[in-house]
Image (cartoon, grey):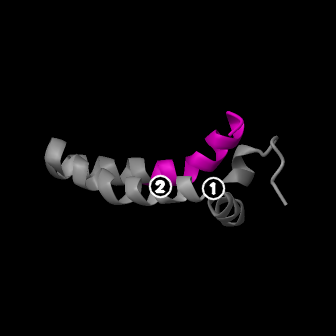
Amino acid sequence: MPPPSDLSFAESLTSEQRQNFYERHRFLAILMILVVLFSPCAGVYVAGLLGAGIGVLLSIAAYYLTPYVWLQIGG
């Protein structure tokens, strides 16, 4: 059952909604795995240890926010 398009931000952060989203969008799930793995590495390459921390924070934010953003833009 697809989630409603008027899904609130708080509802989109639940693990059940996130799991359902990534199960339906396999390509985005694979892309998120790559982002989560390579963002800290890219951060180390660009800015050292501080960049690694920023890369970790950005990858976590991307993992949690992608389902909400994707559904809001109509994907």
The amino acid on which the numbered mark 2 sits, given as a three-letter code, is Met
Magenta stretch, residue numbers: 60-75
Camera-nearest residue between 49 and 73? 73
The amino acid on which the numbered mark 1 sits, given as a three-letter code, is His
Q: Which residue is mark 2?
A: 32
Q: For residue 66: magenta?
A: yes
- Point out the residue furthest to the front here: 27
User: Is the C terminus in the top left, top right, bottom left or bottom right quadrant?
Assistant: top right
User: Is the N terminus in the top left, top right, bottom left or bottom right quadrant?
Assistant: bottom right
- Closer to viewer: mark 2 or mark 1: 1
Residue 37 versus residue 48 in the image, above or below = below
**Would residue 49 appear left or right of 64 to someone viewing this image?**
left
Camera-nearest residue between 47 and 24? 24
Point 40% across, 47% down: residue: 58
**Would residue 39 appear left or right of 3 to someone viewing this image?**
left
Q: Position of residue 35 (x, y in %)?
A: 39, 53
